[in-house]
Amino acid sequence: MASAPDSVYDRMPNDLSAFWMPFTANRQFKASPRLLVEAKDMHYTTQDGRKVLDGTAGLWCVNAGHCREPIVRAVQEQVARMEYAPSFQMGHPAPFELAARLARIAPGDLDHVFFTNSGSESVDTALKIALAYHRMKGDGQRTRLIGRSRGYHGVGFGGISVGGMSPNRKLYGGLLGGVDHLPHTYNIDKMAFSRGQPEWGAHLADELEEIVALHDASTIAAVIVEPVAGSAGVLVPPKGYLERLRAICDKHGLLLIFDEVITGFGRLGRPFAGDRFGVVPDLMTTAKGLSNATVPMGAVFCRKFIHDAFMQGDNPYAVELTHGYTYSAHPLAAAAGLATLDVYQSEGLFERAAELESYWQDAMHSMADLGPVVDVRDFGIMGAVQFEPRKDAPGTRGYDIFTKCYDKGVLVRYTADILAMSPPLIVSKGQIDQIVDTLTESIKEAA
Ligand SMILES: Cc1ncc(COP(=O)(O)O)c(C=O)c1O
């Protein structure tokens, strides 16, 4: 797409200082910026005109590939027709249709949808719905929330409270009270280089019984986990683990929340992780792939019994859930969501992901023997390579490999000494090879 002659896209901004970048080493970035100015299908274009293969679907979100024509067109048409309408006490058609279509592809009876604008908002919304549900049922003493160590649930106060990444928590004081955490499921000695789900570790779910014994079930509202932990570096649940969590939640009347912000919308070769694992949560948080990231959008899916618990009482004027965002069900996001579902369905992208999985797995594990690699993990079209940290300089090896890959034309995601890969689901086998060849070369150079 040609830009206007003096477009900011054609020149390096004069001043990089004012934009305080999120989750970025600002000083490091601004000393050596990496600016992207265009995107199409599997590629970004950098400001200096290089094509970069997107090995990360943006931030795990552009599942259908970049600037897809039907999605772009739907958003353009919507913005010209009605750019905004409130969803408080008013409505417009698109989110009703989108919610109905989402309910049809959701696992089990997760057939009511509350729209948000991000994964973080989806998580905080789901936690609030869980607390409010118990209160509606006369169980208002159920206020505890259980998260998991190394979990990432966005950056709202609810999300960082149940989250388990200490760098994201430690600056922010006491957080929500009454939160406890399950142990994470990763054990390098027991599961390094597992293909897909590790055999070892289902028993780690039994830690939930310990937490229940400690606090008493009658005080616990909900348990939230990512079915596959993404941001922590693709931690794949041991076989049987999620099934056990489900059973323990059922036994004690705890709501189970799956945070599917990354795993939803085809990343695991099925619409949702719940389908893939055969486990239906009570609430499911989503965002990212919902609108292919074209316009920010998130959604919380609720099982029927939760939704119905709110739709009671004699007063039809009562607002059942005092919660929502000015931009919940924003017309542009809803248009993007509908067009995104069309692309997923017409191109069979979830099925395509399932077909590619074994090729992807072999490609990922071809890096297992490289010098500094201490683990390779994969599930669906997600993968991670973990490195031995350099002595006295943890994180630097991962960063070096990440920048080498970028310079060679492949974008991967760097979290300290783990690199994560999650390309759009339109990725070809040749492009998978390119990702892995570039990584291999870069890993050898950084050995
Ligand atoms: C599992 C999970 N939950 C929540 C979030 C937060 O989403 P957002 O950045 O859209 O707020 C993320 C983001 O990566 C995520 O991976």
Image (cartoon, rainbow, N blue to C red):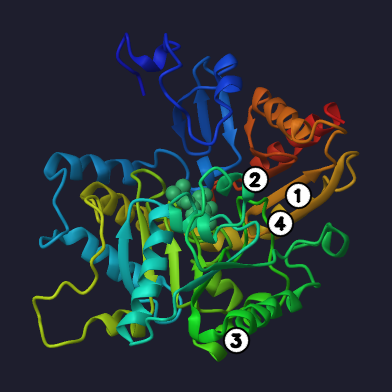
Name which residue lies at 67% across and 54% down: 234
Which is in the foreground here, disc 1 or disc 2? 2
Contact between labelled residues 1 and 3, with CB atoms less than 8 Å apart:
no
- Residue 245: mark in rendering: none
- Where does label 1 land, which residue? 364
The three-letter code of the residue at mark 3 reads Ala
The three-letter code of the residue at mark 4 reads Asp
Q: Secondary structure at mark 4?
A: strand
Q: Earlier in the sequence, mark 1 or mark 2?
A: 1
C-alpha span from label 3 to label 2: 32 Å
Q: Earlier in the sequence, mark 3 or mark 1?
A: 3
- Where does label 3 land, which residue? 247
- Residue 378: mark in rendering: 4
Answer few, some or many: residues within 10 Å of disc 3's Cα (few below 14, many 20 plus, some between 14 and 19).
some
- Residue 421: mark in rendering: 2
Q: Is residue 248 at all visible to an observer of this figure?
A: yes
Answer few, some or many: residues within 10 Å of disc 2's Cα (few below 14, many 20 plus, some between 14 and 19).
many
Residue 135 placement (x, y as % from top left): 34, 80
Contact between labelled residues 2 and 4, with CB atoms less than 8 Å apart:
no
Contact between labelled residues 4 and 1, with CB atoms less than 8 Å apart:
yes
Q: Is residue 64 at all visible to an observer of this figure?
A: no
Q: Secondary structure at mark 1?
A: helix
Residue 42 placement (x, y as % from top left): 53, 38
Q: Earlier in the sequence, mark 4 or mark 2?
A: 4
Which is in the foreground here, disc 3 or disc 2? 3
Q: Earlier in the sequence, mark 3 or mark 2?
A: 3
Contact between labelled residues 2 and 1, with CB atoms less than 8 Å apart:
yes
